[in-house]
Amino acid sequence: MSTAARPTILPITDLSACCSLGSGPLTAEEAGRYATLFKVLADPARLRILSSIAEEGCDPVTASDLTELLGLGQPTVSHHLKKLTEAGLLESTRVGRMMQYRVLPDLFAELRTVLQMD
């Protein structure tokens, strides 16, 4: 049994304020694209990695930094970084022999728009 605190979800008091998505209905292609992105984000380790990178603001982070910070193995961190980069959620840059990663905020803004309820 998990002892982790569950996030508080407040009830909607005005149901008329929550009746449509801000971006309108999705096409089949858009739904597939967003489902793929949300699947990438559905992994707890990836969410921890993203939040750790975002915590650094605009400063890039290396896999070594994340391995130490999160207590995950280097192969695990590298695997998740690859998935996040392939999805377009992170940008990687080679500096010497190391790769540095940073969050690409534009795609997150797009995902927020898709989920925004008017």
Image: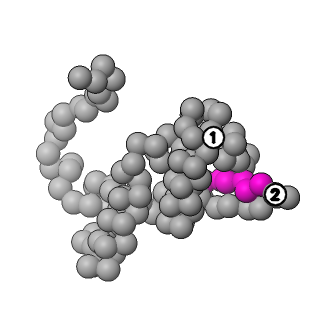
Q: Which mark is residue 97?
A: 2
Q: Earlier in the sequence, mark 2 or mark 1?
A: 1
Whole-percent x and y of residue 58?
70, 48
| Residue 89 appearing in the image | no
- The residue where tag 1 is placed is 66
On-image quarter of the N terminus: top left
Tell me, yes or no, whether the highlighted magenta stretch contains residue 100.
yes
Horizontally, residue 23 falls left or right of residue 56, namely left
On-image quarter of the C terminus: bottom left
Instruction: Mark 2 vs mark 1: give the one in front.
Output: 2
| Callout 2 secondary element | loop
| Callout 1 secondary element | helix
Q: Residues within 10 Å of mark 1 (few under 14, many from 20)?
A: many
Identity of the amino acid at label 1?
Leu
Q: Which residues are magenta?
A: 98-103
Position of 83 relative to 45 (above/below): below
Tell me, yes or no, whether the highlighted magenta stretch contains residue 82.
no
Which secondary structure type mostly characterizes the magenta part of the structure? strand
Q: Which mark is residue 10?
A: none
3D distance between C-alphas at marks 2 and 1:
17 Å
| Colour option used | one colour
Q: Are marks 2 and 1 in contact (CB under 8 Å)?
A: no
Residue under the point 57% across and 34% down: 70
Going by the picture, which residue comes out furthest to the top?
Answer: 3
Toward which corner of the image does residue 111 lie, by quadrant? Answer: bottom left
Whole-percent x and y of residue 4?
33, 23
Residue under the point 57% across and 49% down: 75
| Residue 100 appearing in the image | yes
Horizontally, residue 60 falls left or right of residue 114, namely right
